[in-house]
Image (tube, rainbow, N blue to C red):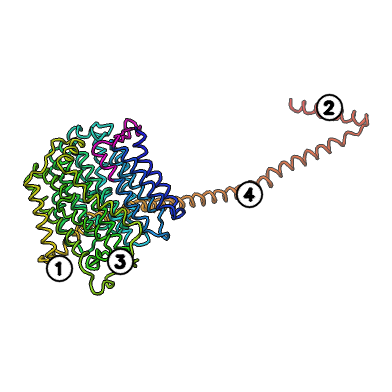
Amino acid sequence: MSAVIWLLISLPLGAGAVLGVTGTRCNRLAPALGVAVAVATLGVAVAAAVTRPQSSAPLFAGMRAGLAVDGLSAFMVVTVAAVTTAVLAFAAGEFGPDENRGRLFGLMLVFSGAMLVTVTATTLPLLLMAWEVMGATSWALIGYWWRRPERVRAADTAFLTTRTADLGLYLAAGAAVAGGAGSLDLRALPDAPSPWLHVITGGVVVAALGKSAQLPFSFWLSRAMQGPSPVSALLHSATMVAAGAYLLLRLHPLLAATGWAGPLVAWTGAVTALFLGVVAVAQRDLKQLLAASTSSQLGFMVLAAGSGGIAAGTTQLVAHAATKSGLFLAAGAWLTALGTKHLPALRGAARTYRLLGTAFTVGALTLAGLPPLSLWAAKDEVLASAYAESTGLYAVGLAAAAVAAVYSIKALWYVTQPLPDDPEAGYDTERDGTRRTARTTPAPLLVLTFAAAVLGVLALPGPASWLKRLVGAPDEPSPKPWEVGLSAGVAFAAAGLAWWWASRPAPVPRPAVRWARGWLHLERAAHTVVVRPVLRLARALAVFDDRVVDGAVRQVARGGLATARIAGRVDDGIDAAVRQTARGGLAGARLAGRADDGGIDAAVDAVAAGARGLGRAARRPQTGLLHQYYAQAALGFAVLVLIVLLVR
């Protein structure tokens, strides 16, 4: 069985890497290959959800890479694979041969594979690796049109924001090791001793909130809308943003072990659902509205994770994935056809493109939480968990559900209005529209729309009890009849009010509208609180480095040069002395030479000359005549006698 789970992750990762590397060289085949791999992955995901395989392999000393499909991850692997298949099928007709389709489809498959590893990982090191791959590929996908600087800046903002929050996972891993959880198994994290338990929990919470675009990190999701529409549908429905909420659902025992993390997470989700819902209401750009609504809807999942509603959060996650991916694809199809995503310019778009209009209508009504569609039932499950935790949480969640109805009906009102007298005047504001939809658009859109409508069956009493047992939360509360009726009434009332008020100016001060339309100015606040101080600190450190550190090095160098110059001068003096000594030596040598030539050599020459003279003189008596020798001997004897006589 372990082969199934390895095939589940290796199929999209391997095929995606090959497609991404080949790029334009397989442009014609890339869409077909990408869809085929996605379909195969979906088949393997269904098999994994049924058989529940698990496996592990050595990773580091004392640590293993663990993978497993349990009740919670079974839902996720099927959801991720299904949404990936639908999005890739849609993208096959949206990108022409002049685009780098190999890179696009390859990156989306790698991203999907990383998400599958994330939801099946049972150890923190493997989770971290998949988390990093997911972040890197999301950056590349958001900045897919990298020749446009504004899109690259948007990708950078999204990446750096989530990357900053991701550091929490590294903090959690370090604290787990320090606390004695050497294996870093996710199930062992709640058993870590204090204070490491609180550090681990804090790191996990920060990373999850950042990835799921919860307050105060929500603004990155606005910038991420610069990416292609299929990328938005994939990343911001069932995968990247859902990863944080899934992690909190998976690690609910860790939240519960601290006492403070559960309420903090629950209130963060509730406040995000409400405030980002208000942001969505203020938007006049369809993709920005859907992005803000994504952050808001994820707030319900985070609320469920914090209040112990594991099954409720899972139902909300799956229903939202189908609903939001379908809405993003519809918005992308209109953007391709009409060249705009500005809501006033999309008046009558649902009437012009009836299939798109039908799918968008069902998706918008589902997003509004109207019964009997899926998100209505899912929200009731979430609100039941919130009510069991706190009445205040329930009230904020119910208010957020009312706001969800308002922004959903607002979008629906615009696209279903009659066409204006000159609709072409508002088109082609972002690109030249084709005035048609691709042949690959209807099938995935209809499948997602159908799923969005019927997935609420998971909240019915029978399926809900089965789901709670499946995810290990059999005692999770269910909504009471009055809660179901109240939420339905609030949703219908808010939807009716939104439809009636849609054509009228909002009775809200303009500064408040600008504040909401600017995503609560969170990005500006981040620049003020984080970016600018960090840049100032960096500049100050650069100045310190230039003037103090480098300055000290330069002063040492100058001192070395000065010392070298002094040493050079001393050396020059020594050389001068040596040269003077040498000159003196030369003069002495000359004098010695003269003395030698005129004295010693002269004396030697004189001695030699004398010796030669004596030799010549001594040779003269040597005549060879005997009588001369007698005469000389007699003379010598006479002289000797004379000397003796005189000396005596």
Q: Residue 178's x, y, as percent?
A: 24, 34
**Residue 519, position as x, y percentages in the image:** 19, 59
Disc 3 to disc 1, how far (Cα)? 22 Å
Q: What residue type is labelled 2?
A: Phe
Q: What residue type is labelled 4?
A: Arg
Which label sits on residue 503?
1
Q: Is residue 241 above or below residue 119?
A: below
What's the distance in space between the residues labelled 2 and 1, CA to CA?
168 Å
| Residue bearing mark 3 | 338
Give the mark nearer the N terminus: 3 vs 2: 3
Q: In this view, does 291 lie above or below 239?
A: below
Q: Crowding near pointer 3: few (<14 within 10 Å), some, many (20+)?
A: many
Q: What kind of element bears circle 2?
A: helix
Q: In this view, does 315 lie to the left or right of 228?
A: left
User: In the image, is residue 271 part of the stretch drawn in magenta?
Assistant: no
Reading the image, the residue beneath label 2 is 637
Which of label 1 and label 4 is nearer to you?
1
User: Disc 3 to disc 2, how far (Cα)?
Assistant: 156 Å
Amino acid type, residue under disc 1 in the picture:
Ser
Q: Does the magenta stretch include residue 58?
A: yes
- Look at the image and give the residue range highlighted in magenta: 50-79
Inter-mark Cα distance, 4 to 3: 108 Å
Q: In this view, does 148 lie above or below 549?
A: below
Residue 186 shows up from this direction: yes
Who is closer to the viewer here, 596 or 200? 200
